[in-house]
Amino acid sequence: MTSSSALPESREEALALLQTYTHSPQLLKHARAVEAAMAAYARHFGEPEELWARTGLLHDLDYERWPEEHPHRGVAILRERGYPEAMLHAIQAHADPTVPRESLLDRALFAVDELTGFLTAVALVRPDRRIDQVAFKSVRKKMKDKSFARGVNREDLERGAEELGVPFQEHVERVIQAMSSIAAELDLAG
């Protein structure tokens, strides 16, 4: 197992790095949601939690500033700072269709990235705006509504769970639970 000492920076330093390149409150919340979901999956699979969480936190480092070069510009920045290749590969594989998703880390990042955004959208249309009150049944219903969160590829949502070897309902519920643990930070606590 990889120890936290294998990461070149603390979480606080990584967050400061993210905030250097990302100013949008929505993208910062998205990074936190993916971080929480990745940490939950690391615990589920018995993988190094700090590595997985940091991968989630920094996966869209370059997206706001250089969307046309995403994820390659961010990977170059992280490589210069000494982040592990497993993390860099997962970040490339989540957004570049030419990079195969080979490891469990690669597949987990792909699986949670779009789902966190979709779940945020589902929570925001609820009268109480609470992520912890989002039910799988509601998620399924919203997935069938093609006009809802139009930019989210429904097939990718299901493919992510399939690639992880996790039933889709279990996947959705695990990510909801992870996001619920930081609901106030995501402005999804009602």
Image (cartoon, grey):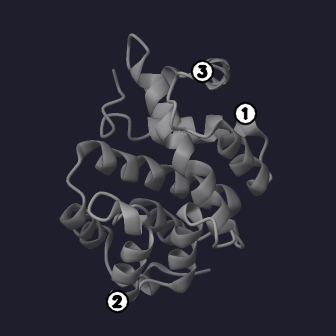
Q: Closer to us: mark 1 or mark 2?
A: 2
First of labels 3, 1 by sequence position: 3
Which residue occupies 23% across, 48% down? Answer: 24
Residue 65 falls in which quadrant of the image? Answer: bottom left
Circle 2 residue: 80
Circle 3 residue: 142
Which residue occupies 51% across, 37% down? Answer: 151
Q: CA distance from mark 3 to mark 1?
A: 14 Å
Q: Amino acid at mark 2?
A: Glu
Q: Position of residue 143 (x, y in %)?
A: 63, 26
The crowd level at tag 1 (other Cα within 10 Å; few <14, some 14-19, many 20+) is some
First of labels 1, 2 by sequence position: 2
Which residue occupies 45% across, 28% down? Answer: 121
Whether 76 is drawn above or below 71: the answer is: below
Of the 4 image quadrants, the one containing the C terminus is top left
Circle 1 residue: 169
Q: Is residue 43 visible?
A: no
